[in-house]
Image (cartoon, helix red, strand yellow):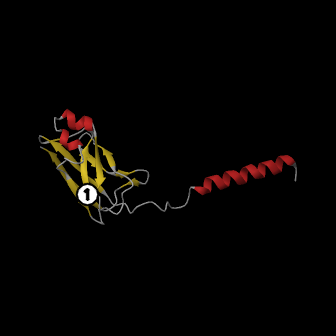
Amino acid sequence: MSTKRTRLAIVLAALLAITSFGCGEDPDKPLLVPATGKVTFEGKGLTAGSITFFPDRDAEYQKDAPTSLLQLDGSFTMKTFPFGDGVAPGKYKVCLSPALAGGIKRPDYADIKKTPWEVEISDTGKTDIELEAK
């Protein structure tokens, strides 16, 4: 085999090894179930910000706080980074982004210790979450 072919074979083998390395299932990935809903304020969909689910201290999965941008109608679809759509089943405290909570003059909704919102997500998910800022 010529030197060029040997080098090419080594480069191709290295590329194959690198690309196949990331194909396995991440052992830290939690079970993710759907979590969708809508946030309203004064009867209208709240937008121009985000929502975060902070796992309860007793939750089985603590590594990530799922988030979602609020859509124009106030709807959201929670995502757990870096795994994708959904959240791990369990109880969560729910917060708005600080800028959004401040914009509606409800700063407590951005503070995990003061937010009145809590949700519990079952093993099958929850797709009808209604959160109204008062």
The furthest residue to the bottom: 123
The residue at the point 26 percent across, 38 percent down is 98
Q: How many neighbours does mark 1 have within 10 angstroms: few (below 14), some (14-19), or many (20 or more)?
A: some
- Residue at 16 percent of width and 50 percent of height: 116
- 80 relative position to 2: left or right: left
Question: Closer to the camera, 90 or 128?
Answer: 90
At 21% from the left and 38% from the top, the residue drawn is 101
- Give the residue furthest to the top: 103
Q: Is residue 130 left or right of residue 9?
A: left
- 30, 13: nearer the viewer: 30
Tell me residue 32's x, y (percent): 37, 60
- Relative vertical location of residue 104 with respect to residue 90 in this rendering, above or below: above
Q: Is residue 112 above or below residue 59?
A: above
Place of residue 40 in the rendered image (x, y in percent of width and height, measured from the top left): 17, 44
User: Which residue is label 1 attached to?
Assistant: 127
Q: Secondary structure at mark 1?
A: strand
The residue depicted at 80 percent of the width and 48 percent of the height is 7
User: Count of labels shown?
Assistant: 1
The quadrant of the rendering that contains the C terminus is top left
Residue 133, image x, y percentages: 15, 44
Q: Is residue 97 above or below residue 94?
A: above
User: Looking at the picture, which amino acid does disc 1 mark?
Assistant: Thr
In this picture, residue 3 sits left or right of residue 14: right
Image quarter for residue 20? bottom right
Viewer-side residue, 91 vs 6: 91
Residue 49 found in image quarter: top left
